[in-house]
Amino acid sequence: MGTPHAITALRDKRGELAGQIDALQDQLRQAFIDMDHIDATLRMFVPDIELDEIKPKPLPPRHRAFKGQVTRAILAMLRKEGPMDAKAITLRLMAERDLNLNDSGLQKAMHKRIGAALRNLRERTLVSSEQGKGGLLVWSIGSNCGK
């Protein structure tokens, strides 16, 4: 038989996954109910509508943000925390949005997105950058953005 710690960890993980499955089934059940209500409402306005012709829209990945959301988050973070490098901003923003910090691909994508947002903000003179320790750029609120 396996070690007690391994068994305990596997039991805990199984319980966690079972809880996730229950929650997802509840969400799925509610989505079906909501869609039935929308279908009934559509039929009130268009009785002969072909609902099967309405194509499902794919959900965007969780790491997507609405236009300007990343920029606002960066500015708020720099106002609150003071000067930071892009890596620290990336990790803090990912943590705030409950994204997986251990996913290196996602972390790289977020770092690129945040770097682009910071460069755009610098062009608009809302943030400024200077060389920090280890050659990293340290970003801070610019003169046009007020502290």
Image (spheres, rainbow, N blue to C red):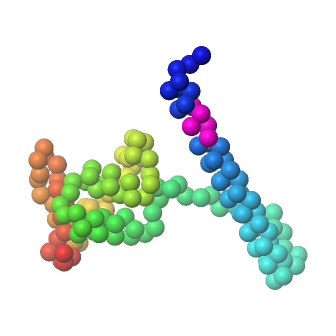
| Camera sees residue 2 | yes
> Can you tell which quarter of the image residue 74 is in?
bottom left
Residue 127 magenta? no
Does residue 69 sit above or below 58 in this rendering? below
> Can you tell which quarter of the image residue 126 is in?
bottom left
Residue drawn at point x = 28 percent, y = 65 percent: 77
Give the left or right position of residue 70, taking residue 87 as reference. Answer: right
Give the left or right position of residue 126, taking residue 104 as reference. Answer: left
Furthest residue to the right?
A: 48
Give the left or right position of residue 21, taking residue 46 as reference. Answer: left
Does residue 146 sit above or below 62 in this rendering? below
Does residue 28 sit above or below 34 in this rendering? above
- Magenta extent: 10-15
**Count of marks placed on residues:** 0
Residue 11 magenta? yes
Residue 93 percent across, percent down from the top left: 35, 57
Q: Judge by depth and name the residue closer to the eye, 18 or 83.
A: 18
Furthest residue to the top?
A: 1
Quarter of the image that includes the C terminus: bottom left
Residue drawn at point x = 71 percent, y = 63 percent: 31
Residue 122 percent across, percent down from the top left: 21, 66
| Camera sees residue 53 | no
Name the magenta segment's main secondary structure: helix
Residue 133 percent across, percent down from the top left: 11, 47
Residue drawn at point x = 79 percent, y = 77 percent: 42
Furthest residue to the front?
A: 4
Q: Judge by depth and name the residue closer to the eye, 18 or 119.
A: 18
> Can you tell which quarter of the image residue 41 is in?
bottom right
Quarter of the image that includes the N terminus: top right
Residue drawn at point x = 46 percent, y = 67 percent: 66
